[in-house]
């Protein structure tokens, strides 16, 4: 378990259209003590999820079955929800409006994911 994370205290929404990546990421987060929302494989599902319950952090892929997740990122940023973009796209492929979002490059390791979450949590009320 990630040091200092109270089990279930931090809600992480996973938005990933690849079933295996979504499943693995969700399992990793649950093992580390996070409360996992999703995973959701579509923009519609993710937007519906945040309308029902706002997460503490969102980890999302940019391209969801050919649909870009930019409207979701915009909504999350407007609500001050930290976004971690998990993608194979390089920085030049993403709009400059999302430079403030933490980014993890696919393929990623457990250390990459937990490091990004640690950096995001360091700027919130949650303690590590």
Image: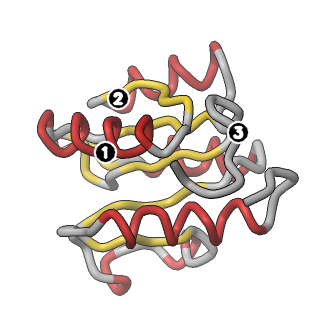
Q: Residue at x 38, y 72 (%)?
A: 112
For residue 28, above or below residue 35: below
Near mark 1 (Cα within 10 A), the count class, few <14, some 14-19 or many ≥20, is many
The x, y position of residue 128, in whole percent, is: 73, 60
- SS label for mark 2: strand
The residue that disc 1 covers is 25
Q: Left or right of 123: which side holds 16?
A: left
Assign a secondary structure to mark 1.
helix
In the orientation shown, which residue stands out farthest toward the bottom?
92
- The answer to whether 26 is drawn above or below residue 117 in the figure is above
Using the image, tell me which numbered label, if any, was put on residue 49: none
Give residue 17's position: percent from left, percent from top. 21, 37
Query: Which circle, 1 or 3, is nearer the viewer?
Result: 3
Relative to 86, say whether 49 is above or below.
above
Residue picked out by circle 2: 39
Name the mark on residue 6. 3
Calculate the distance from the C-alpha at mark 2 to the C-alpha at mark 3: 21 Å
Observer-nearest of 28 and 71? 28
């Amino acid at each position: 378990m990630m040091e200092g994370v109270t089990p279930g205290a931090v809600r992480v929404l996973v938005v990933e259209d690849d079933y295996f990546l979504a499943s693995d990421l969700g399992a990793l987060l649950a093992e580390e003590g996070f409360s996992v929302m999703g995973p959701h494989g579509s923009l519609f599902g993710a937007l519906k999820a945040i309308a029902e319950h706002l997460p503490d952090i969102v980890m999302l892929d940019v391209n969801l079955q050919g649909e870009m997740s930019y409207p979701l990122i915009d909504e999350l940023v407007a609500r001050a929800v930290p976004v971690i973009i998990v993608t194979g796209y390089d920085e030049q492929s993403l709009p400059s409006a999302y430079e403030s979002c933490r980014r993890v490059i696919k393929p990623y390791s457990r250390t990459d994911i937990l490091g990004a979450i640690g950096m995001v949590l360091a700027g919130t009320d949650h303690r590590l």
